[in-house]
């Protein structure tokens, strides 16, 4: 086909895209105005109540994904609407999200993926500080890792969940891709490698095989490791792509995690959990008396009511008696009939019972 024929076909298509974009913008502004009105009504109803409604956000995205005829992929529908909702929510009131680490941490990535870009990030130096910031009202919600596919539970987060009044209101799993980073992209003069202890553990086989000479130094976060490596040429850092970009580091090697499928699951915590959506999870902590068959008995109400368990984790109760807390994730909302009945029975038979929250499944 001649060039000018191609050109003549392009022009009307681009004009059509321009018209559609104008319509989309107009519709987005109509949506934003409606959200602002919803915000006013919510504030009139309960001035101190939350603007964030995790169940409503999840339902909007799921409905659009199921109505979607393509060619836009489902994942992209979710990503686009997360930003649209985030923008509308931000007009109502900007959500402050606390998370661990200087710029470029995986927690930051999880926070933005979950709540969209129209948030204010509150950077914290520890998971304890994340919880404290939300409890004190300095942040609306916090984002903390709870489990990694290679390393298992993030124990400090589990302990904080046990002792805090905050509720789990959402979950977000992200791929964890670690790089070995330095200022120069080489290892000349580098004697130490810094990283969060979980990251060092997730890359230990690779480090032992390729760079056993580097002293491994755990620091508070990977993003902090990246910051230190950007200041000290004797240090390398283990961190992700966002941290590399944020601190101007180059990769000596990429994808150095021992498990290429390495993933971390984060939870969002806040003063309120989420309402039911029909596709939810509930997280709880239980303790049972230290006797034979107690764990088996503990789980019996779940199977009696047909409730599926997706996770069971134990943590020592630190009584010196070989007693444990059990962290259980199950499918369903605490207000769903079968879950409510199972929880009622569980509550009556265990020594300790705490619902951490119900929230939409990712
Ligand atoms: O429906 C609401 O409560 C809104 O505030 C609107 C909206 C949205 O943009 O759709 C925004 C924030 C909430 O978390 C849920 C939904």
Image (spheres, helix red, strand yellow):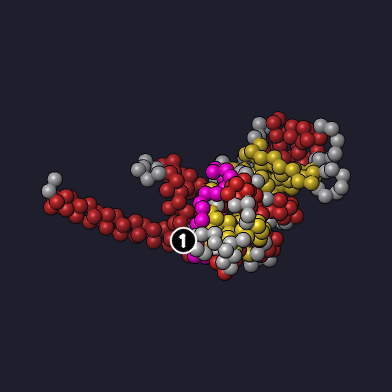
The answer to whether one can see residue 127 in this image is yes
Q: Is mark 1 within 8 Å of ligand 1?
A: yes
Q: In x, y percent, where is residue 169?
A: 61, 52
- Secondary structure, mark 1, is helix
Residue at 66 percent of width and 54 percent of height: 197
Q: Which residue is mark 1?
A: 87
Which is nearer the eye, 110 or 87?
A: 110
Q: Say which quarter of the image contains residue 29.
A: bottom left
The answer to whether one can see residue 221 in this image is no
Q: In x, y percent, where is residue 250?
A: 49, 60
Residue at 81 percent of width and 40 percent of height: 288
Is 254 part of what is drawn in magenta? yes
Q: Say which quarter of the image contains residue 108.
A: bottom right
Q: Say which quarter of the image contains residue 144.
A: bottom right
Which is nearer the eye, 285 or 343?
A: 285
Q: In x, y percent, where is residue 89?
A: 50, 60
In the picture, measured across the screen, residue 113 lies left or right of residue 334, that is left
* Magenta residues (range): 247-266
Q: How many marks overall? A: 1
């Amino acid at each position: 086909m001649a060039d000018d024929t191609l050109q003549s076909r392009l022009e009307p298509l681009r004009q059509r895209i321009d018209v559609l974009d104008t319509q989309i913008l107009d519709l987005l502004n109509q949506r934003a105005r409606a959200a602002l009105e919803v915000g006013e009504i919510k504030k009139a109803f309960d001035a101190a109540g939350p603007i964030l409604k995790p169940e409503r956000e999840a339902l909007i995205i799921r409905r659009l994904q199921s109505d979607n005829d393509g060619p836009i992929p489902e994942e992209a529908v979710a990503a686009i609407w997360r930003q649209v909702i985030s923008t509308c929510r931000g007009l109502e009131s900007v959500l402050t999200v606390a998370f661990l680490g200087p710029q470029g941490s995986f927690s930051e990535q999880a926070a933005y993926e979950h709540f969209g870009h129209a948030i204010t990030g509150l950077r914290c130096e520890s998971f304890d500080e994340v919880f404290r910031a939300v409890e004190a009202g300095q942040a609306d919600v916090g984002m903390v890792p709870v489990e990694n596919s290679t390393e298992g539970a993030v124990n400090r987060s589990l302990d904080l969940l046990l002792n805090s009044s905050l509720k789990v209101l959402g979950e977000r799993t992200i791929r964890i891709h670690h790089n070995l980073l330095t200022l120069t992209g080489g290892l000349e003069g580098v004697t130490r490698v810094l990283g969060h202890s979980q990251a060092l553990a997730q890359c230990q086989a690779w480090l032992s095989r390729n760079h056993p000479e580097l002293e491994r130094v755990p620091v508070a976060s990977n993003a902090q490791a990246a910051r230190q490596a950007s200041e000290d040429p004797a240090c390398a850092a283990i961190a992700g792509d966002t941290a590399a970009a944020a601190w101007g580091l180059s990769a000596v090697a990429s994808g150095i995690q021992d498990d290429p499928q390495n993933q971390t699951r984060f939870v969002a915590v806040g003063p309120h959990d989420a309402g039911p959506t029909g596709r939810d999870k509930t997280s709880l902590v239980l303790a049972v008396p230290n006797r034979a068959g107690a764990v088996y008995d503990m789980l019996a109400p779940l199977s009696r009511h047909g409730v599926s368990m997706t996770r069971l984790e134990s943590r020592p109760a630190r009584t010196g008696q070989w007693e444990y807390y059990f962290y259980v994730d199950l499918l369903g909302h605490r207000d769903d009939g079968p879950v409510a009945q199972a929880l009622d029975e569980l509550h009556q038979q265990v020594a300790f019972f705490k619902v951490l929250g119900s929230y939409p499944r990712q």
